[in-house]
Image (cartoon, rainbow, N blue to C red):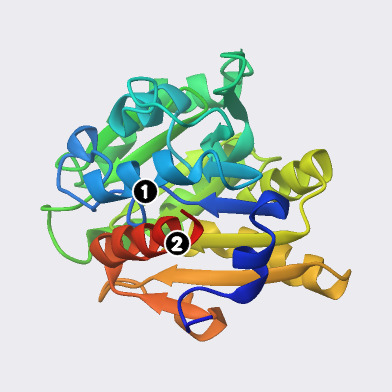
Amino acid sequence: MTARLPDPVLTDPEGTLLGLDFDGTLAPIVEDPQRAFIHPGSLAALCRLGSRLGQIAIITGRPLDQVRRLGRFEASGGLDHLVICGQYGAERWDASTGVISRPPQPESVAELERRLPRWLAEHDAEAVRLENKGLALALHTRGVAPGLLDELAGPLKALADELGLAIEPGRQVIELRAPGTNKGDALLGLVEQTQARQIVFAGDDLGDLPAFDAVDALRADGHWGHLVCSASVEQQALVPRSDLVLDGPDDVAAWLTELADALA
């Protein structure tokens, strides 16, 4: 065992569920989120780990189809044990079957899409970039006026409350989405389905906190859990709760490669 490679995973890889966030963990944070491709080192390592670990799950706030494109998973081999849970678990793709499940867009999100451009103009925030995720709308402020997201936080919460939507803050982005799903629920569902004995989860941002809570709850229930933070100067909330702190997506790729080497 090393500090980066815990014994329970090395001795029982088939009983291990490896859960991973996408942006900021497997992929770098970039100004254009449509260009946030998976780190090539992480993809190569996951392809090697796919035949060794019981389950690999990418649990992300991104829409499912975006993650499939940016991750280039279907063009890669060795990932039959991969599941992608998109939009905080509301969408799902299973690599072994190719089956996709996703709900229709809620009317509340459609109403938000109709109202938001005028709302942003009324709040002097036309520079914000809107992203329609189907089940959510994201407001991106990377490269825009610093502090704008903080100024909009209160009015956006009032708008979300009016429409019955949940607020999901992130690194220079805030989402308004349909409530009812989070990364913790998605992770717990996968643990129940796979009967995993060891659970590892790696994330970088506030949206990953429910998954961290889920791992803590599983530990209390007798499972072995390991929490990993992909750290950044923008977000430190996960650091004090983590068993392992990595220096962003480059270090995540190195860690996954070390794990694949150890299990080869």
Does residue 151 appear in this view?
no
Badges 2 and 1: C-beta atoms under 8 Å apart? Answer: yes
Is residue 141 depicted above or below 37 in this figure? Answer: below
Whichever of callouts 2 and 1 sits on the residue coming sooner in the sequence is 1
Give SS at disc 1. helix
Which x, y percent locates residue 259? 45, 62
Give SS at disc 2. helix
- Mark 2–mark 1 Cα distance, whole angstroms, equals 8 Å
- The answer to which quarter of the image holds residue 166 is top right
Which x, y percent locates residue 125? 21, 45
Residue that carries the numbered disc 1 in the rendered image: 45
Q: How many marks?
A: 2
Residue extending furthest toward the front: 264
Q: Nearer the viewer, residue 115 or 169?
A: 169
Q: Is residue 122 left or right of residue 189?
A: left
Which x, y percent locates residue 22? 40, 47
Q: Residues within 10 Å of mark 2 (few under 14, many from 20)?
A: many
Q: Nearer the viewer, residue 181 or 19?
A: 19
Does residue 113 appear in this view?
yes
Q: Nearer the viewer, residue 221 or 64?
A: 221
Residue at point 16% right, 64% down? 146
Q: Amino acid at mark 1?
A: Ala
Residue at point 48% right, 46% down? 49
- The answer to which quarter of the image holds residue 82 is top right
